[in-house]
Amino acid sequence: MKKLLIFAAAMAACTTASAAGIGVRAGTTGIGADVAFNVLPTLDARVGYSALKWGFDTDTSNARYDGDLKLSNLSTLVDFRPLGPLFRLTGGLIFNDNKFEAVGRPNAVAGSFNATVESGRSAAPYLGIGWGNVAGRGFNFYADLGVMFMGTPKASISANCAGLSAGQCSALQNEVAAEQQRLQDEMKGFKYYPVMNLGFTIGF
C-alpha cells in the first residue's frame, strides 16, 4: 500500500509539472513503470516500481537449492542531463523487498532446509547512467544501466525434519548454522546488483 501511495503521489505531481512523462520498462529489476517530471532545465525527478518472480537454483558445497528469486523495487531517482536531453546521470534510492526463497537438499544427511536470503539493505543506493528523457514530450525510448548497492545478503535457514527419525533430525539441525553461512557466502554477489532496464515513455 505504501508503494502504491508514493506512486500515486508521483502521478499527481506530474500533472502540475512543466514537462512530465510515464514510462513502461523491463529488465533486471523486474517489469514495471516510471513517472517523471522536470524540476530544472537539466534535472528530472523520477519514481518507479517494478516486480518479478522467476526460478533460480544454486549450490553450496553441502547442498543444492531450488527456489525463486522474488523482486520488488520502488525507485526514487534523480536524472541529471548535463550534455543534453538524451544522455543522463542517475542517482537515488531503491526501496526493495528482494529475496530468494528455496528448499535445500543436503548432500550428506537426510531431510531438507527451508531457506530465505534477503537484501542487506531495504533502502539501497543506486548510481547509473542512462539514455532517453523519461519526462520528455512525445514518444521516446529510454534505458538505464547501473548498480544497486543492496548490501551483504542475509540468509536464514531452518531444518525440515518431516518424516525423519530423531537421530536424522538431530544430524540435520546440526548442519543449519554452518549451511546458513555457506548459503550467505554463495549469494554474496547480490551485494552489488546490476541494473539494466529498457522501456518506452510517453511525455506531455
Image (cartoon, helix red, strand yellow):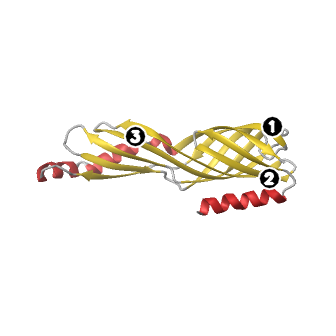
Q: Which of 149 and 101 is in front in this view?
A: 101
**For the residue carrying disc 1, how many other residues have a C-alpha within 10 Å: few (<14), some (14-19), or many (20+)?**
some
- Amino acid residing under circle 2: Phe
Q: Earlier in the sequence, mark 2 or mark 3?
A: 2
Secondary structure under tag 3 reads helix
Foreground: disc 3 or disc 1: 1
**For the residue carrying disc 2, how many other residues have a C-alpha within 10 Å: few (<14), some (14-19), or many (20+)?**
many
| 20 lies left or right of 177 | right
| 117 lies left or right of 109 | right
Secondary structure under tag 1 reads loop
Q: Which residue is drawn at 38% across and 37% down?
A: 58
Residue 155, label in figure: none
Q: How far apart are marks 1 and 2 (CA)?
A: 15 Å
Secondary structure under tag 2 reads strand
51 is higher (above) or lower (below) than 2: above
Q: Distance between the residues labelled 2 and 3?
A: 40 Å
Q: Which of 186 and 72 is in front in this view?
A: 72
Q: Which percent across, then down, holds residue 106?
A: 25, 40
Q: Mark 1 points at which residue?
A: 86
Q: Mark 3 points at which residue?
A: 186
Q: Which of marks 1 and 2 is nearer the N terminus?
A: 2
Foreground: disc 1 or disc 2: 2
Residue 37, label in figure: 2
Q: Which residue is drawn at 55% across and 42% down?
A: 193
- Amino acid residing under circle 3: Glu
- Amino acid residing under circle 1: Leu
Q: Which percent across, then down, holds residue 36?
A: 76, 51
**For the residue carrying disc 3, how many other residues have a C-alpha within 10 Å: few (<14), some (14-19), or many (20+)?**
some
Q: How far apart are marks 3 and 1 (CA)?
A: 38 Å
Q: Which residue is drawn at 83% across and 44% down?
A: 136
Quadrant where the N terminus sits is bottom right
